[in-house]
């Protein structure tokens, strides 16, 4: 495959992943709210009491809340959640679509860990220690995110901090391995 096509495909996947992360965080925050109820949310959108959500009542709901969505945008939302491809959301499809993938407590713990060690690579003393060729390095979760970001950032080329990378964007990922000797 052409390197330019690989780069574009990589950017597309990166944006999909970023969108998924944002929507997952919103689902978790909403689910953790004491006054959130899926049944009430469904009824608020299905204000004509059809028993399902279609593009018309979704568009109407959004308009009531000062967002003017096109029919195509409403259909895109429905397609993401519609499991049986009937162009409408049943109560179960709606509930499943709003259910977070993992508990909010895990996400909260992970974000606290990130805030406590946002530049952990510099603080851990490893910044000046370039790994030897083929050496295995252990990274904590926040460091892995930093490495993934660097690997995906075309400006850095994925070659900072002694990471081995390939030539094309899809291959510009660090080689992470396990070795406790560098701690």
Image: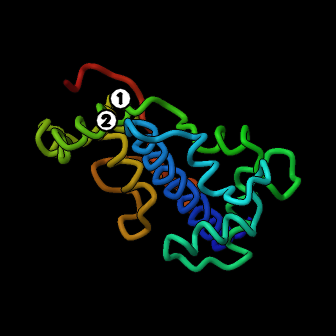
Question: Which numbered dot is residue 105?
Answer: 1
From the viewer's perspective, tell me whether residue 137 is left or right of residue 112. Answer: right
Residue that sits furthest to the front in the current view = 48
Q: Quadrant of residue 48?
A: bottom right
| Viewport quadrant of the C terminus | top left
Q: Position of residue 1 (x, y in %)?
A: 74, 64
Q: Do labels 2 and 1 touch, CB within 8 Å? A: yes
Question: What residue is drawn where x is 37% and y is 56%?
Answer: 150
Spatial distance from mark 2 to mark 1, Cα to Cα? 5 Å
Q: Position of residue 164 (x, y in %)?
A: 42, 47
Question: What residue is drawn where x is 42% and y is 54%?
Answer: 151
Question: Which numbered dot is residue 151?
Answer: none
Q: Quadrant of residue 176?
A: top left
**What residue sits right under mark 2 in the picture?**
108
> Neighbour class for label 2 at 10 Å: few (<14), some, many (≥20)?
some
From the viewer's perspective, tell me whether residue 107 is left or right of residue 23. Answer: left
Q: Position of residue 160 (x, y in %)?
A: 31, 55
> Neighbour class for label 1 at 10 Å: few (<14), some, many (≥20)?
few
Q: Quadrant of residue 106?
A: top left
């Amino acid at each position: 495959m052409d390197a330019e096509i690989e780069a574009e495909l990589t950017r597309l996947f990166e944006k999909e992943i970023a969108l998924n992360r944002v929507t997952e965080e919103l689902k978790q925050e909403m689910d953790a709210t004491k006054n959130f109820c899926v049944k009430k949310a469904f009824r608020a959108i299905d204000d004509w009491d059809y028993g399902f959500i279609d593009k018309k009542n979704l568009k109407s709901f959004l308009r009531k809340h000062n967002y003017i969505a096109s029919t195509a945008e409403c259909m895109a939302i429905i397609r993401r959640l519609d499991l049986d491809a009937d162009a409408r959301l049943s109560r179960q499809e709606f509930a499943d679509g709003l259910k977070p993938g993992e508990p909010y407590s895990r996400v909260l713990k992970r974000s606290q860990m990130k805030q406590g060690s946002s530049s952990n690579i510099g603080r851990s003393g490893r910044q000046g220690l370039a790994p030897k060729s083929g050496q295995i390095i252990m990274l904590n979760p926040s460091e892995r995110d930093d490495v993934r970001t660097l690997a995906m950032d075309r400006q850095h080329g994925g070659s900072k901090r002694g990471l081995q990378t390939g030539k094309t964007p899809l291959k510009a990922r660090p080689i992470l391995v396990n070795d406790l000797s560098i701690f």
